[in-house]
Amino acid sequence: MVRTMRLPLLACRAAPIAALALTLLLASTKTFAGEAGMVAGINGAPTVTRAGATQPLQRGDSVAVGDRITTDAAAKVKILLSDDSVLSIGPQTEVVIDELLLGSESRTGKLRVLAGRFKLAISAWFSGPSDYEIATPTAVAGVRGTVLWGDTTLDAICALQGTVAVRTVKGDATATLGAGQCVTKMAAGETKPLVPTREELARYLKEVSLDAP
């Protein structure tokens, strides 16, 4: 004979409450192992490589952790990340989104720029520590609530707003950049100051800005 246990009325009422509490807890810590943002705008014909398959990237498409976004000589991409940060990718560029972890008490983002030029405007974060890291072939830039620009061909990184901490891959040289400061020569293990003219800086930023329709 199979005996059926009857839960007390209090336990039956508590179960939905416990389930709701678990749902709220899971919602408060979001690990973007999947969707990490969306394509807000494009010029040209960029592509995305996901799980070994390459396909065209269209405006409105979702981007995921692990995606490699590639532009040719005529393409640019603007991506709105899930934390409202904005990633702008210039022509002849490859960027990989390695991690975007948003929690109730912290934020972690990791991007790799394999080649090319980019600008990242990181949104304000009020829920505890924020740790964004952008790696290029020659350096790693740690940023918190700021705007930075970089170009692997020029081997340069600039802080446009806020503060950027730069560490070279070779030799572990470091530099802390304030707004308007740039470094170069990181491939040689140095963080040599770079002072672009106003015209040069305007040209750099235009290269990662979407063209007017």
Image (tube, helix red, strand yellow):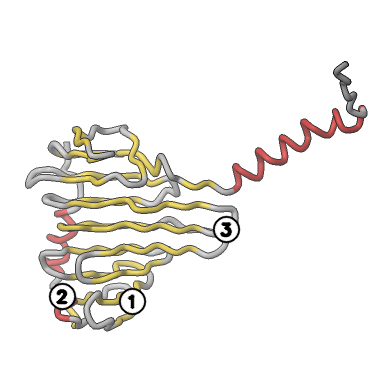
**Mark 1 or mark 3: which comes first in sequence?**
3
Marks 2 and 3, how far apart at CA: 36 Å
Pinpoint residue 36: horizontal percent, then vertical percent: 39, 44
Task: Name the outermost residue toward the left.
Answer: 73
Q: Which residue is mark 2?
A: 187
- The quarter of the image holding the C terminus is top left
Pinpoint residue 39: horizontal percent, then vertical percent: 30, 39
How crowded pointer 2 is (Cα within 10 Å; few <14, some 14-19, many 20+) is rated as some
How crowded pointer 1 is (Cα within 10 Å; few <14, some 14-19, many 20+) is rated as some
The residue nearer to you, when weighing 78 against 173, is 173
Q: Residue at x 42, y 48 (%)?
A: 84
**Three-letter amino acid code at disc 3?**
Ser
Q: Which residue is mark 1?
A: 178
Q: Residue at x 61, y 43 (%)?
A: 26
**Three-letter amino acid code at disc 1?**
Gly
Q: Is residue 60 left or right of residue 150?
A: right
Task: Name the outermost residue toward the top.
Answer: 1
Marks 2 and 1, how far apart at CA: 21 Å
Q: Is residue 190 left or right of residue 30?
A: left
**Mark 2 or mark 3: which comes first in sequence?**
3
Q: Can residue 68 be seen at all in this image of the molecule?
A: yes
**Three-letter amino acid code at disc 2?**
Ala
Pinpoint residue 11: horizontal percent, then vertical percent: 87, 32
Q: Which residue is mark 3?
A: 127
